[in-house]
Amino acid sequence: MKPPSSPLLDEADLAPDASGQLASARYGDVYASRAGALGQARAVYLQGCGLLDSPARWAGRDQFTILETGFGLGVNFLATWAAWRADPVRCARLDYVSLELHPVRAADLLRHAPPELQSLAAELAAHWPPPVRGLHRIELDDARVHLLLAFGDATDLAPRLKLAADALYLDGFAPARNPALWTPELFRALARLTRPGAPAASYTVAHAVQKGLSQAGFELALQPGWGGKQQRLQATFNPVWKRTRHTLPTPWPAALPRHAVVIGAGLAGAACAHALARSGWTVDVLEAGAHPARGGSAMPAGLAHLQPSADDNLLSRLTRAGMAALRRALPPDAADLAQFVPATLTPADAAEARRMQDWRRTVQLPPEMAQWTEAGWQVDSAVLANQAVCAAWLASPRITLRCGVQMARLRHDGASWNVLDAAGHSLARAPQIVLATALQTPHLLAASGLIPGPDWLPLRALRGQAQALPARLWPALRDLSQPWMGSGYVLRLPEAAARLLQDAGDPAAQVDAHHDWLLIGATFETDDQSLTPEQAWQHNRAGLSALTTSPPRPDHVGALRHFAGVRAASTDRLPYCGPLADLAPLRAKPQRAAGKQLHELPRLPGLAVCAGLGSRGLTLAPLLAEFLVATLEGTPLPLETDLADALDPARVALRRLRHGAAS
């Protein structure tokens, strides 16, 4: 039996019924009309939502979102995708969001797809996610079709989605078989995600369904049924009340150019620039240093990895989503940039040993994500060449990089933001600014008068030192095949990172023809606890004592390469990512903050933050970049709203305002 916090879901139990029709033994119902799943998809859902009209509802649109309850075998999605591809005046981007508690297996998805949809089903099956609770984003058809699978209980997940549906497919097993998917509470949650005027369609006309939809603000119309059914349901969302607390995301204003300035060219800034460019934006990247990947991104390589927890906490959920986003963000030919191999996690101390024992009892994930072995926990991970990854993300014709630029403050001029130097001269101008300047972010905001002081977006500096040496000089670690983490870490440098050492002309690098280098680290130093390189090396060597007590060869010292970087970490160890709040109205009247939630705060138009990633830049930067682009463009958020709140740059400021109001 799974613990309540287990993210692992029970997969669909497919079995033919007495007549040979594919059914679910769990619900005792067939997966689609006995007259054919594809015919039902087209007649009930696509036709019911006006997607087979001429022109279809999505015609000429930049973006169109469909929300579905019950993904099942995916025939509705595949039929919609096929209709979209066949329509010459289709929307430029199709978003399809589907809720599913018991996902099917990829093989079953492919096996049971209609023959004419097999090629699309094969592409979908190749990207099919594991049956793990949460949101799973899949990009298809050259990233023009975005499928967001919401795995879990619909009643729990729907209130934590953020999107604006242009059409609604109400599917799933019959209300008598699976009443949880047809409740008034779920209909109200779906209504909060639906644009006024959007159509909804369903095969069922059950009285309880009609009543629940009507109470949620839908106007109903019964149409002739399909496949032997007398009637089917069509509806239009036309509420008589105004939205108050729940506002729909809005698209980027058509009157403004899709032009952004990203300040900072570390992992966070490069990932944001890359995500914006992929979405069609023109991006200027400003970097104060002489080259990208400085500060916390300055190490030659780093480890991205999933972080298990006994209660599947925020960080665990973020790192799972982060590893999936990292795979999407890397170029197809990234073998020299990244090595996706499991990492071994071992306890750093007695407290962590107890936590890892708790994981053995409670963590249930697919083995490719996390599993216990005699050596420790094996988790999904990747070793990446930091500088080469940043360079790859910035290598787009839509991105212009300028280094050695000293930014002093920001000024809002009409519909654009101006980036100014110390003399007040304009360095760049755009309707959207993304601040990814790590420790400088709060200081730049405070100097611009956008927050009262840097402590309203608190970040602390954590210096880290690591060392690289040729693997042949530490024989005990020469055959290490996977990254290892305990009180320290050791990993093999990817080829692109090792090549940088050789290209730099280092004599020690020249002797290793196979670029076989180890990176060993890393310290966590505050301003009052700085270590010399020699002290840092002793610290890092000691951190590997649980892995090996054999020392490196005596001649290793001359080959050592020392690296130092400074991480920017928030006080709660979660990043800041999202639009910046306009604090002026609440600071003028602090009592207004007492009852405010984060999503109710006014936002400064065109200003967003992505900073404070700490030691998880590689794990989280691509995910945060996807999330940020979705917030700017008004597309479905790839994170649940509780995770979005945990990342909100206004979370500290709101607590301070509430405290001030209470005082």
Image: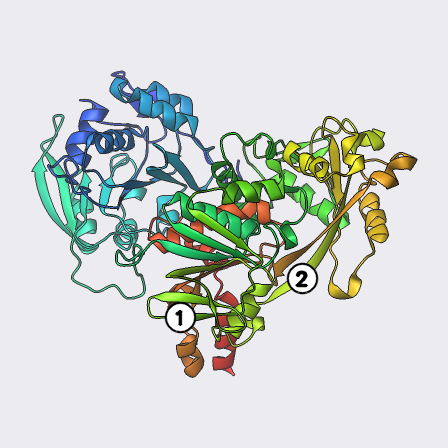
Q: Position of residue 82 (x, y in %)?
A: 25, 29
Q: Quadrant of residue 412?
A: bottom left
Q: Secondary structure at mark 2?
A: strand
Q: Position of residue 530 (x, y in %)?
A: 79, 60
Is residue 355 in sight in this rendering? yes
Residue that numbered label 1 is attached to: 412
Q: Residue at x 32, y 21 (%)?
A: 119
For residue 503, side relative to residue 205 (left or right): right
621 or 652, which is in the foreground? Answer: 621
| Other residues around mark 2 within 10 Å, as few (<14) / some (14–19) / many (≥20) | many
The three-letter amino acid code for the residue at tag 1 is His
| Other residues around mark 1 within 10 Å, as few (<14) / some (14–19) / many (≥20) | some
Q: Secondary structure at mark 1?
A: strand
Query: Which of the marked residues, 2 or 1, is nearer the chain's N terminus?
Result: 1
73 or 517, which is in the foreground? Answer: 517
According to the image, what is the colour scheme of the structure? Answer: rainbow
Q: Is residue 496 above or below residue 167?
A: above
Residue at the far right: name it.
554
Q: Is residue 604 above or below residue 105?
A: below
48 or 385, which is in the foreground? Answer: 385
CA separation in Å, label 2 and label 1: 29 Å
The three-letter amino acid code for the residue at tag 2 is Ala
For residue 449, side relative to residue 293 (left or right): left
Residue that numbered label 2 is attached to: 461
Q: Residue at x 16, y 34 (%)?
A: 44
Front: mark 2 or 1? 1
Q: Position of residue 160 (x, y in %)?
A: 39, 52
Q: Is residue 106 above or below residue 234?
A: above
